[in-house]
Amino acid sequence: MTHQYTYLSPEKKKELSDIAQRIVASGKGILAADESTGTMAKRLQNIKVENTEENRRCFRDILFSSDPSIANNIGGVIFFHETLYQKADNGKLFPQVIKEKGIVVGIKVDKGTAELGGTNGETTTQGLDGLSERCAQYKKDGCDFAKWRCVLKISNGCPSALAIAENANVLARYASICQQVFVLVLKSEFSQKKHSFLSHYGALQVLAATYKALSDHHVYLEGTLLKPNMVTAGHACSKKYTPQEVAMATVTALRRTVPASVPGICFLSGGQSEEEASVNLNAINQVPLHRPWKLTFSYGRALQASALAAWEGKAANKKAARDAFCLRAKINSLASKGEYKPSGAADQSSMQSLHTSNYVY
Ligand code: 13P
């Protein structure tokens, strides 16, 4: 039996838990705008816009300078390093623009994945070196939460015991280093192809190992948020499942593995279309089982796709792009309360699959 030495003060614990609760307050979720420069290149290429620093800034300005009422739907924004030091059209630094709306600023702190030798292409996540110093600087620069991404492959024989153990441990090390400073988003992403429904079993193993490691590392769970996939079929699986089936499998897996002390579970959209991600989140919030955490969104693609399509890199389209983003934020806010009633009038871009093979964020 190990003894837990004093680690976080009661004041620090209260601060962390209050921030986590603010991010997932009723009707709120997270805008994941932490695409790396390389990922932005792909996004901008789709709308035939050059991947320059100014074009990346311009698109982020469309999202971040939305009407302050966006704060009813968005509780936190995850930034990429470059964006943290860019300015809005009104000359203010982006973190200030977000904070003035009462939204919490977060930062992606991992440094991407690296292959685990001798496995079938499985990975671990890099970025622990210098993490404590980087976090202290990000805190000074306005951030109050951090995100770290681990990716587990789901296919025959994967995830391996090695990948499960290694990723659980690296996520717990990140958490233990950063929680002195930040609320933590723990992203456990499944990359999946053909498997018919249930990454379910894989998800159970991965989440159980993750919470065991977090416990071993004395992580204060009230100051964390989990960011997993929903339990869906692989994109190449021919059988289709209803939102109710996805929702039941997802909530069942989470109830078996995620402690009730975790304030919120904020799903990634993982290549679902905007509309699919909203409808599935809505169904999740209607599952007739006790759900001790907030179940909400931390979407990247599923909050930005129709805004990008509306923008096309043209100043004249900025308002249309911002309206498209605000509409998705509003819909996902309703879905996070189980109150979204699709009108059947979803436009083409919101129905398009946003899947990318071997996705890198
Ligand atoms: P999605 O595009 O899958 O929603 O990913 C968001 C994300 O996890 C970035 O933090």
Image (tube, rainbow, N blue to C red):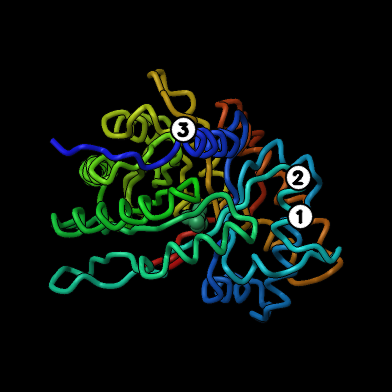
Where residue 233 sits: x, y (%)?
33, 47
Q: Which residue is mark 3?
A: 10
Mark closest to the chain's N terminus, 3 or 2 = 3
Q: Secondary structure at mark 2?
A: loop
Q: Nearer the viewer, residue 321 or 31?
A: 31
Where residue 89 sits: x, y (%)?
83, 66
Residue at 48% x, 23% y: name it.
Answer: 286
Mark closest to the chain's N terminus, 3 or 1 = 3
- Closest to the camera, between mark 3 and mark 1, is 3
Q: Is residue 345 left or right of residue 240?
A: right
User: Mark 3 Cα within 10 Å, few/some/many (few <14, many 20+)?
Assistant: few
Where residue 357 sits: x, y (%)?
39, 67
Checking the image for residue 97, the label placed there is 1
Q: Nearer the viewer, residue 133 or 339?
A: 133
Checking the image for residue 101, the label placed there is 2
Q: Amino acid at mark 3?
A: Pro
